[in-house]
Image (spheres, rainbow, N blue to C red):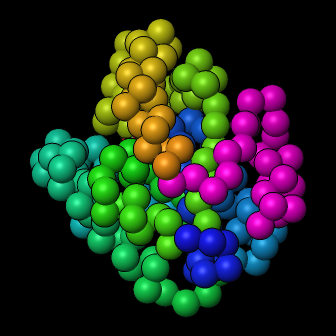
């Protein structure tokens, strides 16, 4: 899809810890768009936390819920910045919907992601004993997802060594 035929929706994709939520909030504030987060939309829809959904309903169901909330987002009018879950690209229907908007891939390596995530406990797929194990899990995820992120991304932004403000500056020039 060329950029002119896309909806005024920006999807931020990338692994956990790449800054999708932080950058999304800031970018929305700066561009006067609405900010939404697919994990939050799913939690609101189901009344369950992401961890509970993985535990009680399975990951497959979670990916289906991602499909449902992406359709909701694409049906709405107006400018939106959408922070997505790191695994949203795993399902073909989700990749298809992402390409209706502008897709920005935030990049940070597994070491950097793991250190940014240190101390958090709300990622069911990243339950680990310490930073080392988180790095290993993120490397496995990246290996599975790299081609998928690449296949939908319109732009890749390296985030290591940059502040969220600097990233937002880059994005507002590109969009
Ligand atoms: C996931 C990433 C999480 C969340 C869920 C699954 C993943 O979102 O959707 O825990 O598969 O990488 P963040 O990328 O915001 O951490």
Please tell me which residue is depicted at 74% across the width and 62% down the height of the picture: 27
Residue 134 visible in the displayed image? no
Location of ligand 1 given as a quarter of the image: top left
Q: Residue at x 46, y 79 (%)?
A: 74
86 sits left or right of 161 in the view? left
> In the rendered structure, does residue 156 fall within the stretch colored magenta?
yes
- Residue 62 seen in the figure: yes
**Quarter of the image with the N terminus in it:** bottom right
Quadrant in the rendering for residue 112: top right
Identify the magenta region: 152-175
Which residue is at 36% across, 61% downward? 94
- Point out residue 25 in the picture as x, y percentages from the top left corner: 67, 61
Please tell me how many numbered marks the rendered image carries. Answer: 0
From this viewpoint, which residue is outermost toward the bottom?
77
Residue 169 locus on image (x, y percent): 86, 55
Q: Is residue 21 left or right of residue 165?
A: left
Q: Nearer the viewer, residue 14 or 125?
A: 14
- Residue at 42% x, 15% y: name it: 136
Above or below, comparing residue 65 to residue 138 in the picture: below
């Amino acid at each position: 899809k060329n950029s002119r035929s896309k909806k005024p929706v920006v999807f931020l994709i990338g692994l956990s810890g790449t800054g999708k939520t932080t950058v999304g909030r800031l970018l929305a504030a700066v561009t006067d768009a609405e900010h939404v987060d697919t994990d939050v939309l799913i939690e609101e829809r189901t009344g369950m936390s992401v961890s509970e959904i993985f535990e009680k309903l399975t990951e497959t169901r979670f990916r289906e819920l991602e499909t449902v909330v992406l359709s909701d987002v694409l049906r709405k009018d107006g400018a939106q910045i959408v922070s997505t879950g790191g695994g949203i690209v795993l399902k073909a229907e989700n990749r298809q919907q992402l390409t209706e908007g502008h897709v920005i891939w935030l990049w940070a390596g597994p070491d950097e992601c793991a250190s940014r995530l240190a101390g958090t406990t709300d990622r069911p797929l990243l339950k680990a004993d310490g930073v080392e194990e988180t790095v290993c899990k993120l490397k496995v995820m990246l290996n599975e997802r790299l081609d998928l992120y690449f296949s939908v991304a319109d732009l890749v932004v390296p985030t290591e060594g940059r502040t969220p403000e600097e990233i937002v500056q880059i994005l507002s020039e590109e969009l």
